[in-house]
Amino acid sequence: NAGVTQTPKFRVLKTGQSMTLLCAQDMNHEYMYWYRQDPGMGLRLIHYSVGEGTTAKGEVPDGYNVSRLKKQNFLLGLESAAPSQTSVYFCASSYSGIEQYFGPGTRLTVT
Amino acid sequence: AQKVTQAQTEISVVEKEDVTLDCVYETRDTTYYLFWYKQPPSGELVFLIRRNSFDEQNEISGRYSWNFQKSTSSFNFTITASQVVDSAVYFCALSGQQTSYDKVIFGPGTSLSVIP
């Protein structure tokens, strides 16, 4: 039982490049989330999903897209990376939407 | 609107001292949940506790205790006899009816350093 896993763990992008972060959970959770963590700002919700095939915007959705084609996977895409998207990205999942289980994080640097 | 405030940005204590991390929240919901998470230097987020708005009993778990007071909208976290392993960033968080319980609002975090 791996819980929540994130791929990759680290990534360096150049401005304008695109990439996809993968989050996978094996707990059969309905709810999945993508957050970014920046110094002094806590975690801010980017997008979330309340079930397979559904997505919704969070607090800071601009510049990101997501997809939830399978219940166990939640993908976060950056179409044209910008230095402001340098951050640590956390994925989380939840059975009820209340208690969340987090992945180990992905450290992204955009130069 | 919902908001979580952790006024203490950084705290340093000497090992074995007690320390309290403050959390003040704002919500118009009558039913809501409060959480504390720990983020050690390794980076992962570890769930510590969840309380619902109908349960104001204080909770103790080993050296950790939580004081929930609806009258002051606070959910403070105390570590007794702190240890170096307690060094981490601690986040207070809130989930409620306004967000359909789908989303959790995190505070900015308090960085705790326990000095040996």
Image: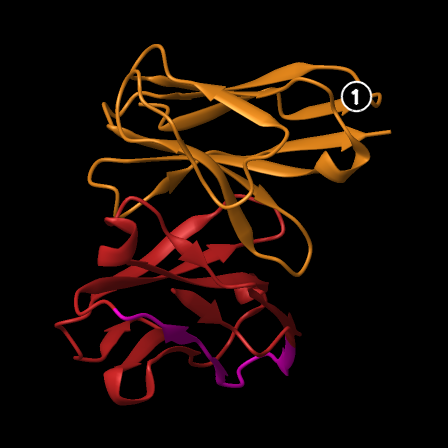
Chain colours: A orange, B red
* Residue B45 x, y percent position in the rendering: 48, 47
The relative height of residue B2 versus residue A31 in the rendered view (above or below) is: below
For the residue marked with disc 1, what is the amino acid?
Answer: Leu
The secondary element bearing badge 1 is classed as strand
Check residue A85 for magenta coloring.
no
Residue depicted at x 73% and y 20%: A80
Residue on which the image places disc 1: A13
Residue depicted at x 26% and y 89%: B71
Looking at the rendered image, the quarter that the N terminus of chain A falls into is: top left
Q: Nearer the viewer, residue A62 or A87?
A: A62
Check residue B27 for magenta coloring.
yes
Count of marks placed on residues: 1
- Using residue B40 as the reference point, say whether residue A16 is left or right of it: right
Report the span colored magenta: B11-28
Label 1 packing within 10 angstroms: few (<14), some (14-19), many (20+): some
| Residue A88 falls in image quadrant | top right
Q: Nearer the viewer, residue A56 or A94?
A: A56
- Chain letter behind tag 1: A
- Using residue A74 as the reference point, say whether residue B12 is left or right of it: right
- Using residue A87 as the reference point, say whether residue B18 is left or right of it: left
